[in-house]
Amino acid sequence: MSGTPDLFGAESPTESSGAGPRRPRPGAPLAARMRPRTLDEFRGQEHLLGEGKALRTMLERGTPASMILWGPPGSGKTTLARLVAAETDTTFVPFSAVTEGIARVREIIAEAGERLQATGRQTILFCDEIHRFNKAQQDAFLPHVEAGTVTLIGATTENPSFEIVRPLLSRAPVFVLEPLSAPDVQEILEAALADRDRGLGTMELQVDEGVLAGLAEEADGDARRALGALDAAGRLAGPGGRITVEVVREALQHRFAVYDKGGEEHFNIISALHKSVRGSDADGALYWLARMIETGEDPLYIARRVVRMASEDIGLADPRGLEIALAARDAFHFLGPPEGELALAEAVVYLALAPKSNRLYVAWAQARAAARDTPGEAVPLHIRNAPTGLMKKLGYGAGYAYDPDAEAGVSGQTYLPERLAGRRFYTPGRFGFEKTLGERITWFDARRREARRGASDAGEPDDAPE
C-alpha cells in the first residue's frame, strides 16, 4: 500500500460509529464517493463473504473479532474493516502505522476503555499497514486485545507469516483478500457511471463498447485505480461527452498527477515493465524498473509483480524463474535500498530472457472453472482415505494401487472424478522445460494405456478411458 489509501479513497483520521461509512466530502475523488456502504455493495472476496463463509458468519452474528486482512492494494481491506464495524454496530477508529506512532495507539486504547466502561460500546482499532510496526510495537496491542478493550483489525500487503509477531497471529486470524476480478471491477465502474447521487450519473456520459471491459482488465484487480481513471476520463470528456479508448488513455496519463503524485504514471509504468518482460526485452525491462525505482515506487510492490510475472508468463517453461523472483524479493527485504535493487534487476533480466509460457496460467483457470462447475463430484472410492474399519467396509481405498510399486512406476488408475475422467487441463508448450514436461506426459500416458491393457487382459475391470 505504501502509504496510499485503501480501496475507494482516503481515510478519515477520526473515529466513526458503526452506522456505516461516512458520506464523503463534496469534491472527493470518485473512488471515495463510491465506497461501498453495505455488504451488498461490496464486490469480490466471495471466499470470505459468501453464504456460510467464516467472515460472513461472524458478521451475521454481530460479534466482531480481531483479525488480520492480507491482500494487495485496492482489494478492499479498509472498506471491509469499515463494513465490519457497520455490520456489528461498533465504533471504528482508523490508525496508520506509517504516519502515526505508539503514542496515538495508547490514546485510542484509553478512549476505547472509557467508551466501553461508560456505554458498553466496543471499539474496532483499524491499523493500516500494521507490518510497518516493529515487534515491540506490535506486542503493545496484545494485552488490550486479550482484555477486550479493543478489537484489532490489521491490514497488510506483506505476508503476515514474516511481518506479524506470532502472539498476535494466534489472537487475530488471517483473512486473505484476492485481487478483484475484471468482471467485479467492471461492475463497480458501471455502477459509478449510473449513480446519480455519488457517481457520474448526472454527467450523462456515453462510453464506447469495450472501454470499461478493457479498463477493468488493465486495473489489475485494483478498483481504486480503475475508478480514478474513470473519474479523470469523465472530467476530460465533460458532461454529455463520450469516453473512448483515446480518452481513457489520456486520463491514465493525468490520473496519478491528480490522485497519486508520488506514483508518476504508476499504472502505465508497471504495465510497461510487465509487457517488456513478457516480450523478452531485457533492456526495456531494466529501463522501466529503473523508472519505477527512481520515482519512489515501493520496491516490495515491484517484487510482488515480478513474482506474478514468473508464474503467469514464464511458468513451467523455466521453473527457476519463480525461484529467482522470490529470491529477489527476499534479498531486497534483507538488504534494503540501494543494494537490494540489484536483486530486482537480476530477476527482471532473467525473466525477460527466459522462455515464455502461459500454459500453467490457462490450466489453473480451467481447473478452477471445472471445480466451480462440479462442486459435488465425489472423490473416487479407490483414492479415498480409509482410517477406520467402517470406511474400509464401505469400499474406501479399495483397489488403490501404489504407483511406485507398479511396473514402470505407473499403475494406470484414474484420479479425477468419473465425470471429469480423461479431462486435460495442462498442456505444456514447446519451449524450455515445458518441452521436457510434454515428453513426460506423453510417456506417462503411454504407460497408463499399457497398464490398463494389461489389467483388461487379466480380466480386471478397466475403469479409465483411453
Image (tube, helix red, strand yellow):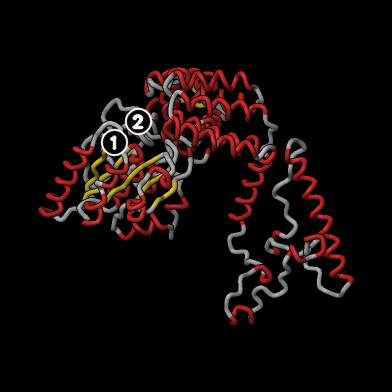
The spot of residue 380 in percent (x, y) is 67, 68
Residue indicated by mark 1: 96
Q: Is residue 247 above or below residue 365?
A: above
Residue drawn at the location 70% of the way across and 62% of the way down: 415
Secondary structure under tag 1 reads strand
Q: Amino acid at mark 2?
A: Gly
Mark 2 near mark 1, Cβ–Cβ under 8 Å?
A: yes
The kind of secondary structure element at disc 2 is: loop
Query: Residue furthest toward the left?
Result: 118
Identify which amino acid the numbered label 1 is placed on: Ser
Determine if residue 237 is in view.
no
- The x and y percentages for residue 203 are 39, 25
- Which quadrant would the C terminus be assigned to in this image? bottom right
Residue 235 visible? The answer is: yes
| Residue located 63% across and 22% down the image | 282
Viewer-proximal residue among 47 and 305? 305
- Residue drawn at point x = 57 percent, y = 79 percent: 388
Disc marking residue 3: 2
Q: Position of residue 5 (x, y in %)?
A: 35, 32
Quarter of the figure that contains the N terminus? top left
**Does label 2 or label 1 sit earlier along the sequence?**
2
Instruction: Give the image location of residue 6, x and y in percent.
Output: 37, 36
Q: CA distance from mark 2 to mark 1?
A: 8 Å
Question: Residue 408's quadrant in the figure?
Answer: bottom right
Question: Who's the residue at 66% across and 77% down the image?
Answer: 395
